[in-house]
Amino acid sequence: MDGATTALMTESSRVGDPATRLDQLAISVHAQARDIEAEWRALFESAGSNVYQSFEWTDCWLTTAAPALGVRPAVVALRWEGQLVMLIPLGIERIGPLRVARYLGGEHANIRMPLAAADWRSPIDDAATDRLLARVAAALGGVDLFDFDALPADQPETTHFLASHRAARPARCNVGTLPLEADFAALLAAHRGAKKSKKHRWQKNALAPVGGYRLRRAQTGAEAAAMFDTFLGEKAAWFRRMGIADSFAEPGIAPFFRALIARRWAGDENTVIDIDAIEFDGGLHAILGSGTAMGRQSGYFLAVADDEWRRISPGELLIHDVIAAACARGTRLIDLGRGEERYKASWLDRTETHVRLLRPVTLVGRIGALALRARDAAERRVRNDERLWRLVMRLRRSRAEGQAASDS
């Protein structure tokens, strides 16, 4: 037996099985990401898979949206023999009588998974996971329920053990993805290229009388902030027309994205946010905000101007050119956030399955978990029934039209 094998066996014996290791993790809770910034950045560089796990994303959320939304920050750091091996950035929210621990970022974080070193992600028996969550709950204090939503269940090599818990259920929405390659023409050919190319030529011809168009990416913080302002106006108009509450009008949300923009152009060359737009006829007619990390570009928001040019589908034109540019930059994967809208489905041919894990801590938490599961099941039934979903959309629009008429 050689020395390396002996050392490995000795280490394995000392460390024990995965469940035992989990029981031995040291837990600390931090109100600010900056308390552990250096460790966070180091772990992200070695084990990160998406921009939502980055220090920049969480730090911006904690300094803007969390206080405005009344969320109590609770960044959970887990260490093995003094070394940071896992981060679970949580916030404690009040929902009626419930005190719920949720991943920071809310609905604006389309992927919500802990940041964990590679050898701390593998499936572990549910009892060990529950013991760990009980210890985390004790460290947090005043928690009735853990709500781990939008957990990827099938990301190669990055799926976290929370997603494999027997209590995990399908999330309300999955995320569509598109693996990219350097040759955009080859990628296009594999995705109904003839049809997409014909549509693209038609769009270019339709815009020729106004001087054509250009894909414009913000180059400065001021330019990005101005483009974001335009997005807010376009998206607010769409929300009103569809009869949907404007999620970007919630306290702290616009300041959060402005903080991401400020961080993006602070000189550290991160790509926590970029803003792309289709510009023609003197204005921006489609705007996409996204962030890129570890070769994955993730869409944060998209809006299309509600004017006569909507007939040429400027949003589809934007997605076409954004994907082409991502291929040229060497990006390996792109997603456009949660949901299954038509403009996403026409490109994103792979489904990243997400699950939601609800783990109650108290009796009130158990009741709350039952209510949340029932609501999720009802929403999935409606979304999966095309007839019911069309009816919901019509009712929303009718309500919005009625509200607009009463306001005029």
Image: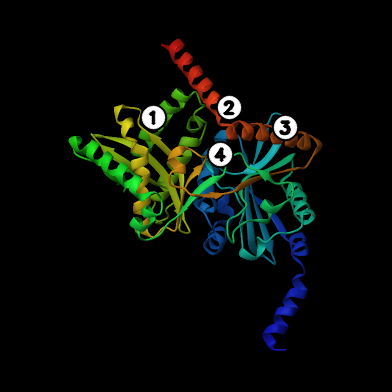
Side (left or right) of 201 relative to 99: left
Label 2: element kind: helix
Label 1: element kind: helix
- When the figure is inspected, residue 271 is found, relative to residue 289, above or below; the finding is below
Nearer to me, 109 or 85: 109
First reached walking from the N terminus: tag 3 or tag 4? 4
Q: Residue at x 70, y 67 (%)?
A: 81
Residue bearing mark 1: 233
First reached walking from the N terminus: tag 3 or tag 1? 1
* Amino acid type, callout 3: Ala
Label 4: element kind: helix
Nearer to me, 357 or 394: 394
- Residue 134 position, x and y percent, is 77, 49
Q: Residues within 10 Å of mark 3 (few under 14, many from 20)?
A: few
Residue bearing mark 3: 371
Residue bearing mark 4: 107
